[in-house]
Image (spheres, rainbow, N blue to C red):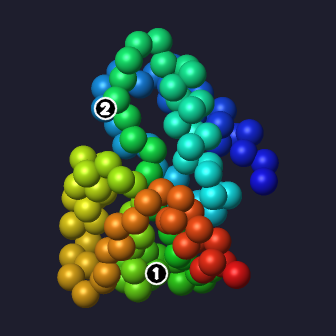
């Protein structure tokens, strides 16, 4: 897969980041892309900065994307960082997803889940 655009943005993030941020991939990317994004950001920061790269794949179908977003059958959050997990849970809280399972997993597993869902 051509990740040049993704890694270019990661380099820009590295140059601009000044405080803790969670950087999230939503699209289908090869397993291991989160590691490459992390490395690219680290190579471009001018000082020591804490950040997390997480995977939060979308499961939207053409023609029903808005309904799929507002009423997902599952939410997958891939990160081992508890602070990032809490931030991402807070982002979903206003959607009142009481009956929607939120699966917390590793970033690589979340990347693989997206590939499996597209198979």
Q: How far apart are labels 2 and 1 at the CA level?
A: 30 Å
Mark 1 crowdedness (10 Å alpha carbons): few <14, some 14-19, many ≥20: some
Whether residue 8 is situated above or below residue 29 in the rendered picture: above
Which part of the image, by quadrant, shows the C terminus?
Answer: bottom right
Front in this rendered view, residue 1 or 8: 1
What residue sits right under mark 2 in the picture?
A: 20
What residue sits right under mark 1 in the picture?
A: 68
- Of circles 2 and 1, the one toward us is 2
Helix, strand or loop under label 1: helix
Left or right, residue 31 beside residue 105:
right
Left or right, residue 8 beside residue 37:
right
Residue at 26%, 78% (x, y): give it.
Answer: 97
The quarter of the picture where residue 91 lies is: bottom left
Residue 8 coordinates in the image, percent (x, y): 66, 32
The quarter of the picture where residue 44 lies is: top right
Residue 57 coordinates in the image, percent (x, y): 51, 65
Mark 2 crowdedness (10 Å alpha carbons): few <14, some 14-19, many ≥20: few
Left or right, residue 96 beside residue 57:
left
Which sits earlier in the primary sequence, circle 2 or circle 1?
A: 2
Residue at 63%, 78% (x, y): give it.
Answer: 116
Residue at 21%, 76% (x, y): give it.
Answer: 96
Point out which mark residue 76 bears.
none
User: Are the residues flagged by discs 2 and 1 in contact, CB closer than 8 Å?
Assistant: no
Left or right, residue 36 beside residue 84:
right
Residue 103 coordinates in the image, percent (x, y): 36, 73
């Amino acid at each position: 897969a051509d990740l040049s655009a993704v890694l270019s943005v990661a380099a820009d993030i590295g140059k601009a980041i000044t405080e803790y941020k969670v950087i999230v991939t939503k699209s289908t990317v090869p397993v291991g892309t989160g590691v490459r994004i992390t490395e690219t950001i680290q190579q471009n920061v001018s000082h020591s900065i804490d950040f997390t790269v997480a995977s939060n794949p979308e499961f939207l179908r053409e023609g029903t994307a808005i309904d799929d977003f507002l009423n997902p059958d599952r939410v997958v959050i891939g990160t081992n960082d508890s602070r990032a997990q809490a931030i991402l849970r807070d982002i979903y809280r206003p959607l009142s997803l009481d009956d929607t399972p939120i699966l917390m997993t590793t970033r690589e597993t979340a990347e693989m889940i997206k590939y499996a869902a597209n198979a």
